Image: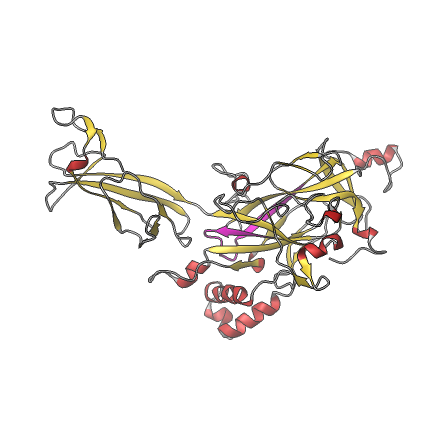
Amino acid sequence: MPTSGQHRNIPGYGNRDYAKYFRMKEVRFPFDVYSADRGTFYPKQTWITIPVTQEQADFFLPVWVDEGDYTVEFRSTAENAPSNVTDQRNANTDLQHHRASDTIPVEVIGRLYDFKITDIADYNWSSVFRLNNGTTPKGTSYWVGKGDIDGEPRGNNNPYVLSIAPGSHPNNGYKNVAVKTGYHFKFELKSKGNMFDSKDGVRITPQFYFVDKTGTQRQAVDLYYHSNTKRFVRIGSSDDTERRYVILNDRMRNVSEQEMTDTALYIYDHYYTFDQIGHMSRSQFVHEYIRKAKEKTLVGKYDWMILPYQVRTLIGPKQIPTGVDYQRAYASVQKWYGEYSIPAGVYAVPKGTNLAEYGRKNKLDEKSPIFLREGYIIVNFNLESIRDGNVNAPHLQYIHGPLMNQWQLEGYRNSYTDPYGKHFSLRDGDVVFYHGDKSSQDDFDAQVPH
């Protein structure tokens, strides 16, 4: 809010600093704000005074502010203004006005952030994520990078950053280890904003790449597997009918009872009418919610997933100013839980390969030379939010936003060198390297359940 600029082009005015003629400068937000310097809370529609000599002031939006379009108002009052002061836009060049005012349109938008991997079922990784012979979560996380939501240092060091690849294991004896196909990995991410309704979700679209063990010749690939009824089913085809499930209240997730209780109470109070749920008390509903959270929730397939509200908890602030709705505040930050794997018996070919045509001209079996093996299958995630079930118009983007890339803001590394000196280029969204030639079927006679 400057005090200098062009006024009337007459003697004594012109383009100069008018600070000594200001009585006050003010700003008014149509939503709650905190001042950055003092942390003072200002309810929405409060005129906030800015010192005349101060040209810039920083404010923060509380997370409970609804996403949407707003108008911010500014006004500067002359030191000789009467009690019945009137406004003029930009500058009071008309002498009957003693206050200059302006408005600026702004958009409040949420965030997707804090994606991390919290468990890998591969036994080579058990000591990284689990205690007590694999029965208790250790609390280890692999984050997008070393930055938090706004890029400030998080405190995690190497190797606890994505992508998980050879060299990511903290034990030097496992420096050549990626993840064997068939083993799932668990992950979490957070969102801020209006993502607390029953039809909101996070859509995850996996893409697959293959890179050789020297880090070169990265290429997009199609993945095939054998189903119970058909051989060589392409992931994403009409024959690909395998379903993906997530259990929220899983031992290896270690979701707190308080987190589930808060979420259950919000659902009870906001998702149902009395006629629908009046037979059940709030405490009974919480008990039933926690019990059902031990059951599987369908989230999608190998080629897409949408994490629904059943695998989302609400984790917003509870220490809030007087007058702010308590449930609206803690519903304003959400945590989403998911897991993913590729099939144990998986076959990679360059994307677009006509495998059926190849099979008509050549012998097609699991050892056919068309399949890529000597390297790694990279799973890449595109994450976006879905509001009110509208899958055709995703709301928030983790990577492909028009004005920012949260993946980069959190410090994702776009290249790394493995323990053998091989250089790998990475792409935003690369989360896990799977061995192209090692499977969970190598560990057991039959595929492990997961």
Residue furthest toward the right? 363
User: Is 178 positioned to the left or the right of 85 in the image?
Assistant: right
User: Is 350 positioned to the left or the right of 12 in the image?
Assistant: right
Q: Quadrant of residue 369?
A: top right
User: Is 157 positioned to the left or the right of 47 in the image?
Assistant: right
Q: Nearer the viewer, residue 78 or 103?
A: 78
Residue furthest toward the front? 172
Query: In the image, is residue 191 part of the stretch drawn in magenta?
Result: yes
Whether 372 is drawn above or below 225: the answer is above
Q: Quadrant of the C terminus?
A: bottom right
Q: Quadrant of residue 377?
A: top right
The residue that appears at 15% across and 41% down in the rendered structure is 86
Q: Main secondary structure of the magenta part?
A: strand
Q: Nearer the viewer, residue 33 or 308?
A: 33
Residue 330: x and y in percent read: 45, 60
Inspect this view and state whether residue 406 appears: yes
Residue 431: x and y in percent read: 64, 44
Q: Nearer the viewer, residue 444 or 276?
A: 444
Number of numbered discs overlaid on the protein picture:
0
Residue 320: x and y in percent read: 38, 60
Q: Indicate how the structure is coloured in the image.
A: secondary structure
Inspect this view and state whether residue 234 appears: no
User: Is 40 positioned to the left or the right of 229 in the image?
Assistant: left
Q: Quadrant of the N terminus?
A: top left
Q: Which residues are magenta?
A: 188-207
Residue 200: x and y in percent read: 52, 53
Q: Nearer the viewer, residue 141 or 14?
A: 141
